[in-house]
Image (cartoon, rainbow, N blue to C red):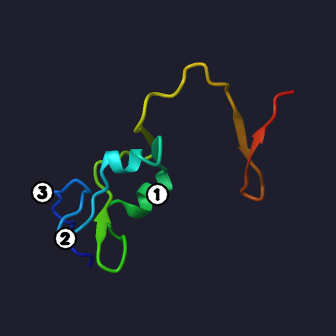
Amino acid sequence: MSPPPADTTGAGPRGTTADGSCPTGRGVAAEFDTVHLSVAGYLTTAGRVVAVDDEMSTVLAGWDPDATYWLSDAPPTDATEQTWTRGDDDVWQQQRPD
């Protein structure tokens, strides 16, 4: 049986507590524009303690499966549409316009 999730109520600026780790939006936004949680990632992670390193762990909480969270400004509305397909070898490839 897994240990209960850490209480992150008193999380400091880096999101760490004595019992666990909770990444902060600012910390993640410094390196990424978005965070996406796939359905597979949700199903294999929700409700489980995830080791961050030998001394710290975290849990997936408050996330919706197959959702993308924007940490920076909204995506540009004039972006060019792209079509991607996954081949039989399970590799994604961008389809070029004709």
Residue 78 location (% of width, % of height) = 60, 19
**Residue underneath mark 2:** 19
- Element at label 3: loop
Disc 3 crowd rating (10 Å Cα; few below 14, some 14-19, many 20+) is: few
Residue 95 in the image: above or below residue 47 = above
Q: Amino acid at mark 3?
A: Gly
Residue 35 in the image: above or below residue 78 = below
Residue 43 location (% of width, % of height) = 42, 58
**Residue underneath mark 3:** 10
Residue 51 in the image: above or below residue 59 = below
Point 46% across, 49% down: residue = 31
Image mark for residue 41:
1
Point 17% across, 70% down: residue = 18
Q: Amino acid at mark 1?
A: Gly
Disc 1 crowd rating (10 Å Cα; few below 14, some 14-19, many 20+) is: few
| Between marks 2 and 1 in the image, the one whose residue lies nearer the viewer | 2
Point 37% across, 45% down: residue = 64
Q: Measure how far apart labels 2 and 3 are at the Cα level.
A: 11 Å
Q: 52 or 50: which is nearer to us?
A: 52
- Relative placement, left or right, of 40 versus 91 is left
- Element at label 2: loop
Q: Measure how far apart labels 2 and 1 are at the Cα level.
A: 23 Å
Classify the position of the N terminus by image quarter.
Answer: bottom left
- Element at label 1: helix
Classify the position of the C terminus by image quarter.
Answer: top right
Disc 2 crowd rating (10 Å Cα; few below 14, some 14-19, many 20+) is: few
Q: Amino acid at mark 2?
A: Asp
